[in-house]
Image (cartoon, grey):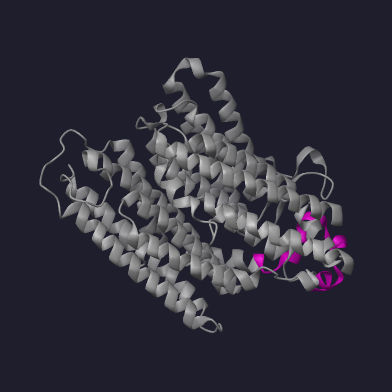
């Protein structure tokens, strides 16, 4: 049992405690600890991902109590991918915050690391109750981060965000309680076994619990009709926080994939794939409404927030097809969309700071101080988001469209994705024109982008050409991850051992 597996949870927690203890030593010490911790986290995450290339499951029994009695962390290709993605996004978001935005409120770095602890824990845990615990950790930290810097907009958005998430947490707890009452376990692998063996009189309550979990995860993922909180919250948050929040919706999507492909997956008997009929239509409608939001936005920050909704809809539609090809394409698109929307949030702030009082509003304003640099970055980000060649957005959408070729809902799938892309193209063309062409030629002097901020923006936007350049390797890994997800019996065997497998699954493993 490698102790490295728990480091993505322990390292940010230790860094947060250390920063609390050294608060009086000043901001420089706090930033140094924070950035060193982030660098360490990226290296550890990359090393963990490397260990999953052969397809083995790694299980870490906390306190040496084995599953299903103890708390376990489970590393497979999907969880390793999500932890590395979180670390990379967080590193550049943190770097951007060090341009002075971390001084706008208290304990920014502490909250930032507590959120990382919650995110990494949610991706690694093999236990449903601990998924709830890590959800709460990341949500409590996100409440503080959303309000970082203060102001009426953030307070109002934060109030809605808190109320909705408290309601979601209450539903989550009810679902967990019912499942535990029915099945006597909350270990995900053990739940998968017990659900498959459930008595007929237990099925109704288990079914209701599963639907409650779907609502909770849908709220976290910002699926229709539970996405209305997102544009206000994300556009009101400080730029570095908004960039980090680009991964928050992916926690909901990850949870849907994990629960409904493992616990309620192919081995779950009559409850098998019970969420699948909902995922494709919900994803397509979310995508369509998100595209209308992008088109209707009058502010770049809000437009990028709606682009997050578009990415959620696209991902969920791909997951809803439930094939290896569609899951692999969705995971590739997940990487692309998370990094690019994170970069676009940061870029929107850079542009806004060079437009004075007009900010990122799409109306006549002064010429930005560095028009060539910022327009080039915006052009790259827009190309990537819309999905035009040769960047990663094009590859991700092409893979998704190819995955749907033989599906019954192909016409709807293709139509919604292509029309939404067309809407995004129109909207971002209008935005680029408003920001860089239709100006009053009045320069704002002395507000040039700092080198640290520029590095963060460029690094995140550079992800798109890199994902395109290494597209074969990345899509090969996501295909392997999708194949692993489609065989939940190996996850169960990895956590519980082969003696716990349902009979049908045991035959497959043998």
Residue at the farthest left position: 441
Would residue 81 be visible to someone looking at this image? no
Left or right of 190 in this view: 88: left
Magenta stretch encompasses residue 503? yes
- Residue 179 visible in the current orientation: yes
- Counting from the top left corner in percent of width and height, residue 266 is at 73, 71
Give left or right: position of 75 versus 389. right
Q: How many marks are shown on the rendered structure?
A: 0
Residue 91, percent from left and from top: 45, 41
Q: Is residue 449 above or below residue 217?
A: above
- Residues 335 and 434: in front is 434
Highlighted range, magenta:
485-508
Q: Position of residue 8 (x, y in %)?
A: 60, 41
Quadrant occupied by the N terminus: top right
Residue 508 sits in quarter: bottom right
Location of residue 321 by image quarter: bottom right
- Residue drawn at x 42%, y 41% is 237
Magenta residues: mostly which secondary structure?
helix
Q: Which of 319 and 309 is in front in this view?
A: 309
**Left or right: where does residue 500 sit relative to residue 347?**
right
Residue 463 or residue 304, whichever sits in front: 304
Above or below for 133 versus 462: above
* Rendered image quadrant of residue 448: top left
Q: In this view, does 376 lie to the left or right of 402?
A: left
Q: Residue at x 18, y 46 (%)?
A: 365
Residue 471 in the magenta stretch? The answer is: no
Q: Which residue is drawn at 26% across and 57% down?
A: 431
Quarter holding the C terminus? bottom right
Which residue occupies the extreme top position in the image?
Answer: 24
Task: Tell me residue 474's x, y (percent).
Answer: 49, 62
């Amino acid at each position: 049992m490698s102790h490295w597996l728990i480091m993505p949870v322990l390292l940010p927690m230790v860094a947060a405690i250390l920063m609390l203890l050294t608060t009086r030593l000043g901001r420089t010490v706090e930033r140094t600890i924070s950035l060193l911790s982030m660098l360490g986290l990226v290296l550890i995450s990359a090393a963990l991902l490397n260990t999953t290339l052969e397809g083995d499951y790694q299980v870490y029994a906390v306190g040496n109590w084995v599953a299903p009695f103890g708390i376990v962390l489970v590393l497979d290709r999907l969880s390793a991918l999500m932890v590395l993605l979180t670390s990379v996004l967080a590193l550049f978001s943190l770097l951007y915050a060090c341009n002075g935005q971390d001084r706008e409120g208290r304990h920014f770095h502490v909250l930032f690391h507590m959120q990382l602890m919650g995110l990494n824990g949610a991706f690694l845990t093999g236990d449903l109750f601990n998924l709830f615990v890590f959800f709460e950790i990341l949500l409590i930290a996100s409440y503080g981060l959303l309000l970082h810097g203060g102001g009426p907009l953030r307070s109002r958005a934060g109030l809605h965000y808190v109320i909705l998430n408290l309601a979601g947490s209450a539903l989550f707890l009810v679902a967990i309680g019912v499942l535990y009452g029915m099945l006597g376990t909350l270990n995900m692998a053990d739940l998968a076994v017990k659900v498959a063996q459930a008595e007929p009189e237990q099925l109704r309550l288990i079914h209701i619990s599963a639907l409650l979990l779907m609502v909770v995860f849908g709220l976290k993922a910002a699926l229709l009709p539970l996405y209305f909180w997102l544009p206000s919250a994300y556009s009101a948050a400080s730029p570095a926080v908004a960039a980090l929040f680009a991964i928050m919706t992916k926690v909901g999507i990850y949870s849907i994939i994990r629960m409904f492909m493992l616990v309620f997956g192919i081995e779950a008997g009559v409850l098998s794939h019970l969420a699948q009929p909902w995922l494709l239509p919900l994803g397509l409608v979310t995508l369509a409404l998100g595209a209308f939001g992008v088109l209707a936005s009058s502010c770049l920050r809000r437009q990028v927030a709606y682009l997050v909704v578009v990415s959620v809809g696209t991902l969920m539609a791909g997951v809803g097809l439930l094939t290896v090809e569609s899951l692999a394409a969705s995971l590739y698109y997940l990487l692309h969309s998370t990094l690019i929307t994170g970069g676009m949030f940061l870029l929107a702030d850079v542009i806004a700071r060079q437009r004075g009082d007009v900010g990122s509003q799409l109306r006549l304003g002064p010429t930005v101080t560095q028009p060539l640099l910022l327009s080039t970055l915006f052009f790259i980000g827009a190309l990537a988001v819309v999905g035009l060649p040769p960047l990663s957005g094009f590859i991700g959408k092409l893979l998704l469209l190819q995955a749907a070729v033989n599906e019954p809902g192909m016409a709807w799938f293709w139509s919604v994705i292509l029309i939404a892309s067309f809407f995004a193209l129109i909207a971002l063309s209008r935005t680029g024109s408003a920001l860089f062409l239709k100006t009053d030629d009045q320069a704002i002097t002395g507000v040039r982008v700092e080198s640290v901020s520029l590095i963060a923006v460029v690094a995140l936007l550079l992800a798109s050409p890199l994902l395109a350049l290494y597209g074969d390797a990345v899509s090969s890994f996501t295909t392997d991850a999708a194949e692993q997800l489609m065989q939940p019996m190996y996850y169960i065997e990895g956590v519980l051992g082969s003696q716990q497998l349902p009979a049908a699954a045991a035959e497959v493993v043998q």
